[in-house]
Amino acid sequence: LEEQLRQSQKMEAIGTLAGGIAHDFNNILTVIAGYASLIQINGEESEAAAMAGEIVLSVERAAEMTRSLLAFSRKQEVHLDTVDLNLVVAELHKSLTRLISEEVELVVRVAGEELYCLVDRGQLEQVLINLAVNARDAMPRGGVLAISTGVAEPEGEGMPAGRCAVITVSDNGTGMETEVQERVFEPFFTTKDVGKGTGLGLSSSYGIIKKHNGTIRMQSEPGAGTSFSIYLPLSVERPAGERRDAEERPGAGS
Ligand code: ADP
């Protein structure tokens, strides 16, 4: 418990710091990109124009990183809609198949009941993609990537109150040593080679789930595999379009 509290305070502090830096950094990047494009355009076929082109590309990569940082620090806008998480997972199936290698088997199992949650669908999909990419990377020689949904009533500090939807993403890959487990949610922490990992996947995922009043939990065993569970509060609202009792509001009793 103490450990979890310490961890969330640490993430809070890092998030505030990172968000501030990312915001200012973005403004600087815009200026760099602007001038580099000008040099590129005015320089026509010159060597300087080609170099300016390289600058533009690098700036785009840096901008991508700041976007991830902003997602982590909750400075990104959210567009909330009530969606059935089973649908989100099912519809992501195809994109995930393209992401993973042939040696990895993707097993998707969704709950029998609908799991309506108030979420930013795009951001939640981003989280699931981050987790799937990590699982894939942890199974270079193949394995099973399992994604399942269900309902749980989690207990403990920092867990959402009441009935929750759970999405679990697990792999039977390398797993992690304790020293790695303790740091996975820190921004820029990565064990991957340069160019392969930014160390922002899990930190931004953590930020996104927190922003949804949810929790993300990890279990890992070296040599056996890793499992991430995302807990999100269930909503009593129905998705727009199939809403009948529009007056029902979440959080009332139950
Ligand atoms: P990145 O993937 O860019 O390294 P992440 O924040 O997504 O950044 O992950 C941080 C680190 O956590 C990874 O470099 C890896 O060491 C570890 N990790 C994350 N997911 C898994 C997993 N499923 N199995 C083993 N290690 C993992």
Image (cartoon, helix red, strand yellow):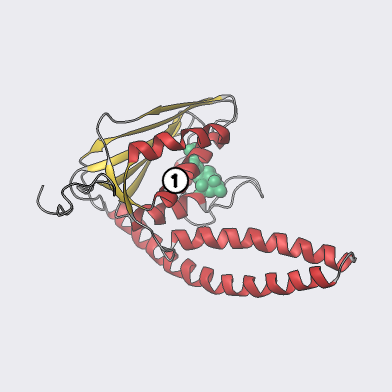
- In this orientation, does residue 98 appear? yes
Which of the 4 image quadrants contains residue 231?
Answer: top left
Report x, y in % for residue 88.
39, 40
Q: Amino acid at mark 1?
A: Glu
Residue under circle 1? 125
Name the residue rendered at 50%, 50% in the picture: 201
Residue 37 image point, x, y percent = 74, 69
Vertical arrangement, residue 254 with respect to residue 56, above or below: above
**Does any atom of ligand 1 lie closer than 8 Å to the CB of label 1?**
no
Disc 1 element? helix
**Horizontal and vertical percent position of residue 113:** 24, 32
Front in this rendered view, residue 185 or 84: 84
Q: Quadrant of residue 65?
A: bottom right
Residue sitting farthest toward the left: 253
Q: Can see residue 183? A: no
Work out whether 32 lies above or below 77.
Answer: below
Percent coordinates x, y for residue 228 in the rendering: 39, 40
Examine the rendered structure and indicate whether residue 44 appears above or below residue 250: below
Q: Looking at this view, is 146 or 44 the one in front?
A: 44
Residue displayed at 49% across by 38% down: 132
Residue located at (66% from left, 49% from top): 195
Q: Residues within 10 Å of mark 1 (few under 14, many from 20)?
A: some
